[in-house]
Image: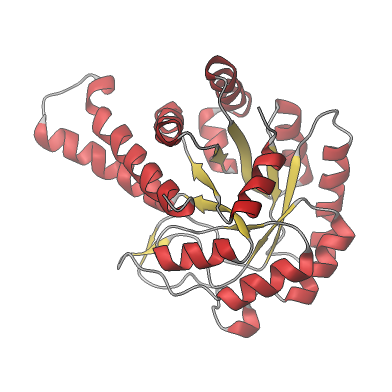
């Protein structure tokens, strides 16, 4: 089996992208895995600080590892949006395959210093762990929105600057970069987010020299996904659409079977709804 880094390089070479789907419980893990397995594609399970606190840091690491070993399948685990060195160290020690240090809301200099510290720890942990840096603020919550989140600006002057991206990558040594290119966390209730700045995606990838990660993919159009992937995005994050599908699946289940009390029965619709989203997105990301 290839490493995560090898799968990322393969995705770049074929102008496809690896799907990264956030989960909060074991139901989500199985839904994401089965969706990817049905298409025979590598997959990344993502857990933010809040999500991994809920499911357990070492517990989710053990679960993903056991699935990878039992099925001999390329399923990987990423610590999404991690805000301190201590929590980066925690997930590396627990066995995660990659981790994002999110310094988008601190000064450029401090972001460089802390990200570099995370990179150095990962390089000396005795195994391959990828470190992703973040440059550009796109919000912090994966939820339905009535308007663009406070503090997020989508004008070209507020997006990640390619030369800053180059400097950031050179000084930190990160394996991956998550830029602000017109994307945002969460999704508008209309279901369609503003268009991505594809020219900025291309410029950042050319300048920084590492694969890009598109955060806040929920609500973006199929056209934007495909163009972003062609121009340097190798991983796409989906969370809000997963949460919405899970919630709607549970509501559907209770609507049809209001007296059901067995969780493994009333959660089936939720798990299937998540799996359906995963399959739909992976087909887009892989031109299937």
Q: Position of residue 134 (x, y in %)?
A: 69, 59
Identify whether 153 is placed above or below 183: below
Q: Is residue 76 left or right of residue 134?
A: left
What residue appears at the point 57 percent right and 34 percent down from the top-left corner?
53
**Residue 66 picture quarter:** top right
| Image position, residue 150 (x, y; %) | 51, 72
Residue shown at the point (76%, 37%) measured from the top left = 129
Q: Is residue 122 above or below residue 263?
A: below
As rendered, which of 103 and 198 lies closer to the eye? 198
Q: Is residue 147 left or right of residue 153?
A: left
Q: Nearer the viewer, residue 74 or 173?
A: 74
Q: Is residue 139 visible?
A: no
Q: How many marks?
A: 0
Q: Position of residue 198 (x, y in %)?
A: 56, 74
Residue plotted at (44% across, 47% down): 282
Q: Is residue 58 visible?
A: yes
């Amino acid at each position: 089996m290839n490493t995560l880094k090898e799968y990322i390089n393969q995705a770049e070479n074929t102008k496809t992208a690896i799907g990264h789907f956030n989960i909060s419980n074991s139901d989500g893990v199985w839904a994401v895995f089965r969706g990817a397995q049905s298409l025979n594609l590598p997959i990344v399970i993502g857990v933010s600080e809040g999500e991994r606190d809920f499911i357990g840091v070492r517990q989710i690491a053990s679960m993903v590892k056991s699935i990878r070993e039992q099925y001999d399948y390329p399923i990987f685990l990423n610590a999404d949006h991690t805000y301190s060195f201590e929590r980066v160290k925690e997930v590396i020690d627990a066995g995660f395959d990659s981790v994002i240090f999110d310094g988008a809301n601190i000064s450029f200099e401090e972001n460089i210093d802390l990200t570099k510290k995370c990179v150095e720890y990962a390089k000396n942990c005795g195994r391959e762990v990828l470190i992703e840096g973040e440059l550009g603020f796109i919000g912090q919550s994966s939820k339905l929105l009535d308007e663009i989140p406070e503090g997020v600006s989508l004008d070209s002057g507020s997006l990640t600057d390619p030369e800053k991206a180059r400097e950031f990558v050179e000084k930190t040594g990160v394996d991956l970069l998550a830029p602000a290119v017109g994307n945002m966390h969460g999704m508008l209730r209309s279901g369609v987010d503003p268009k991505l700045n594809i020219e900025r995606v291309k410029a950042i990838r050319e300048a920084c020299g590492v694969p890009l990660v598109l955060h806040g993919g929920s609500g973006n159009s199929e056209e934007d996904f495909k163009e972003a992937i062609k121009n340097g995005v190798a991983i796409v994050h989906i969370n809000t659409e997963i949460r919405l599908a899970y919630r709607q699946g549970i509501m559907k289940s209770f609507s049809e079977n209001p007296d059901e009390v067995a969780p493994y029965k009333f959660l089936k619709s939720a798990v299937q709804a998540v799996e359906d989203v995963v399959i739909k997105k992976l087909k887009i990301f892989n031109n299937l």
